[in-house]
Amino acid sequence: MSTETRESWSGKLGFVLAAAGSAIGLGNIWKFPYITGMNGGGAFVLVYLGCILLFGLPLMLCEITIGRKTGKNPYGAFKSLQLKRSRTADVIGVLLMLGAVSLAASGHYGFAVILFAAACLFVWLGFAAVGLISLITAMLILSYYAVVGAWIVDYVYRSFTGGLHFTQVSEAAGAFNHYLDREPGRIAAELIIFMVLTAAMIIFGIRKGIERCSKVLMPLLFFLLLAVIVRGVTLPGAKEGIRFFLNPDFSKLSIAGVLEALGHAFYSLSLGMGITITYGSYLRKDENILSTSLWIVALDTLAALLGGLAIFPAVFAMQLAPDAGPGLIFNVLPATFYRIPGGMGWFWAGLFFLMMTIAALTSAAALLESGVTFIMDQFKVRRVPAVIGTFLGVTLLGFLTCYSTNHWENLPGIEHFVQNVFNVRTGSWFDLLDKLTSNWLLPLMGLLTVIFVGWIWGARKAGRELREGTHGLVDENLITWLSGFRGEPRYMEAANSGLTIMTLWGILIRFVGPVVILAIFIQVITK
Ligand code: PHE
């Protein structure tokens, strides 16, 4: 499809809501609350906000800018922005090859082959490899994200049909494990339902599909969230939960916690996997990238904070203990809601899981759309066949997760293959995908994206694209602005130089970002 006929968002609201839909997902409402509870409450929230503003926002600006400049999918975008063969990409290729050799030496042959293939991609395609790998990452993430979506669909159904009648967490946990272990066929059917809904959101295109759905679903999501919060905080004893969630306790905050905040900031904003490049590629030139990004970031953070308020006050009021991991929403919450006096527990559980379904659906739509846009751009296929093809591929891959969430035993052949070839002994296919994508691929792609924009494409050229549509906002001198001297004749000459949003962004993506992301890696490697 040529750029002239490429669709675009109808305006700022449509783009902001769609991108917020991509960002607001399971990460906000389920993961953020419990990592906050474990890492010192309010103290962690402050660190997280810092990470969002200092690293998340600049990377988001990079991704939207790359997308809008090129109007292409991530692979096509990186390819068209790199002018010539890149030495840096060759160096990255060599480094990856060294990594592959050391993995092979330690017996991780499977990972060694993957890393070797990635190295070849870099040498062959240059930075376009980043686009390609991030697309693969997005599809892998979707293949297990949609399975969690399927569980949530199941819990909506069970809430409204009276199937979640547990007063004890242990009972709820038993039922959940039974479901995961013994009912893979049911999960697979629900996966298909979830994926059909996801595909239905995007099959009508950007404006008539994603945008229209987001304009209805996002307000509904916030409404449901507020309803659940009101129920929770008005229960006697709810204050303890708010205290657990938000009271700052700096003694519980460790370096590992800080790095966790950073990694989660990228995940939560859907950065590092080409999605925001894809959504940005449908953005018109006259839209303000800076202010739209600030909106997306603000909505995403608000949803995370509201997610905590929807969960902890109720959990504490019902005298249950906050749990970590999947247990929090699938074990503790059913028991929490069921204990709410008045016999309406099923209703609140239903609303909660409905809200989670919406959050998961709009994120899944963004993931699927990045695959679809890639196929449409690169192979000149129309939308409908592209959606069907991507849908089938991801759903089939998702079946692997359905059959092996808790245990490998359901997939003996694959279990054997993975354990011998990859030399990984723990967990399941689900764990393997989650660790590989969230811990390794996302930060790696984020790192390469900031390096690309800061050094290869170049902050100067990228900045020109970023500036378009911002009405000079990015060039305001921050010092005169913040200190209230804006417009003062004495400072007029200096107004466009010195510390502006633009120059601050340049520094963050060229130096601070790469160093800090490397720190996350070292933490992950040495863990
Ligand atoms: N940002 C989403 C969340 O917070 C997760 C996600 C990651 C969605 C990557 C799309 C792509 O849950």
Image (cartoon, rainbow, N blue to C red):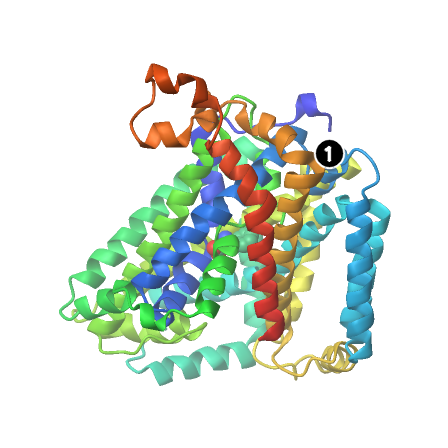
Q: Is residue 33 visible?
A: yes
Q: Position of residue 123 (x, y in %)?
A: 85, 50
Q: Nearer the viewer, residue 495 or 513?
A: 495
Query: Percent x, y for residue 17?
Result: 44, 38
**Residue 196 % position (x, y):** 57, 52
Q: Residue at 58% across / 39% down in the picture?
A: 62
Going by the numbered disc 1, the residue's amino acid type is Leu
Left or right of 415 on screen, residue 351 = left
Mark 1 nearby-residue class (10 Å; few <14, some 14–19, many ≥20): some
| Residue under the point 59% across and 25% down | 464
Quadrant including the N terminus: top right
Q: Is residue 114 visible to us here?
A: no
Which residue corresponds to mark 1?
A: 81
Q: In the figure, 294 relative to 309: above or below? A: above
- The residue tagged with tag 1: helix, strand or loop? helix
Picture layout, residue 182 above or below residue 354: below
Apparent side of residue 486 relative to residue 61 in the rendered image (left or right):
left
Residue situated in front as seen by the camera: 314 or 55: 55
Query: Residue 478 appears in which quarter of the rendering?
Result: top left
Q: Is 401 drawn above or below residue 443 in the view shown?
A: below
Q: In which quadrant is the C terminus drawn?
A: bottom right
